[in-house]
Image (cartoon, rainbow, N blue to C red):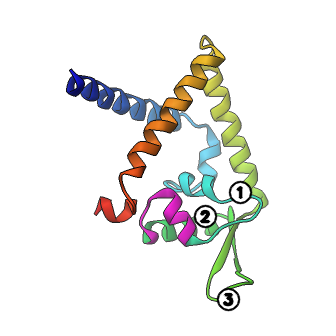
Amino acid sequence: MATALRRELMTEARELTKAMRLLKSRLPGLQSAIPPGTLQVLWIISPASGCHLKDLAERTSLDPSTVSRSVAALVKAGLVARSADPDDGRASVLTLTPAGARALDEIAGWYDQQLAEALREWTPEDIAVLTALMRRLSTDLMSRHDHPLEAAR
């Protein structure tokens, strides 16, 4: 019985991934300002304090070379700026440019509108329970790996 439930969970996880991919494909012209495949990295850069490339790789669980290519594309698009780290001259601090912050605000607003429509008949309690269970599953899955990048190889 437990195996069947886990398989059903995996099926629903694939369906959710497909639904999110379809939702993302409907993103209006906002996405054209953001280089393909870089949105996840852009979301993670702190608008207030910025971050380092190493932090982005850890927080996205992506290979540093993948994150580096994404950051280069975001810098070229004018959405992210690099500046010297005052504490470590060898490192760069990545920050959102005003254009990057505007693009994220617009995308966040669009996603919020889409979720509001999809969840229109859900109660706040339903949304809170789903959010808590998703957080718990993500935490439990991630806790099984000390170093997600090394475990994926």
Q: Which contiguous range is marked in magenta?
A: 54-64
Residue 114 versus residue 141 in the image, above or below: above
> Residue flagged by tag 2: what amino acid is it?
Leu
Q: What residue type is labelled 1?
A: Gly
Question: Does any portion of residue 124 appear in the rendered image?
Answer: yes
**Residue that numbered label 3 is attached to:** 89
The residue at the point 39 percent across, 63 percent down is: 147
Q: Is the C terminus in the top left, top right, bottom left or bottom right quadrant? A: bottom left
Mark 2 nearby-residue class (10 Å; few <14, some 14–19, many ≥20): many
List x then y, in percent, for residue 141: 39, 45
**Residue 100 numbered tag:** 1
**Percent coordinates x, y for residue 33 in the rendering:** 63, 52
Distance (Cα) linking label 2 and label 1 = 9 Å
Q: In this view, does 153 lie to the left or right of 84?
A: left
x and y, in percent, of residue 121 in the image: 60, 10
Q: How crowded is mark 3: few (under 14 residues within 10 Å), some or many (20 or more)?
A: few
**Residues tagged 2 and 1 counted as in contact (Cβ below 8 A):** yes
Residue 118 visible at all: no
Q: Disc 1 or disc 3, which is closer to the eye?
A: 3
Determine which residue is flagged by label 2: 74
Q: Is residue 119 left or right of residue 100?
A: left
Lower position in the chain sequence, tag 1 or tag 3 = 3
User: Quarter-wise, where is residue 123 in the image?
Assistant: top right
Which of marks 3 and 2 precedes in the sequence?
2
Tell whether label 3 touches label 1 (CB within 8 Å).
no
Which residue is nearer to you in this view: 85 or 125?
A: 125
- Give the residue type at disc 3: Gly
Examine the image and state in which quarter residue 29 appears. Answer: top right
Which disc, if any, is residue 87?
Answer: none
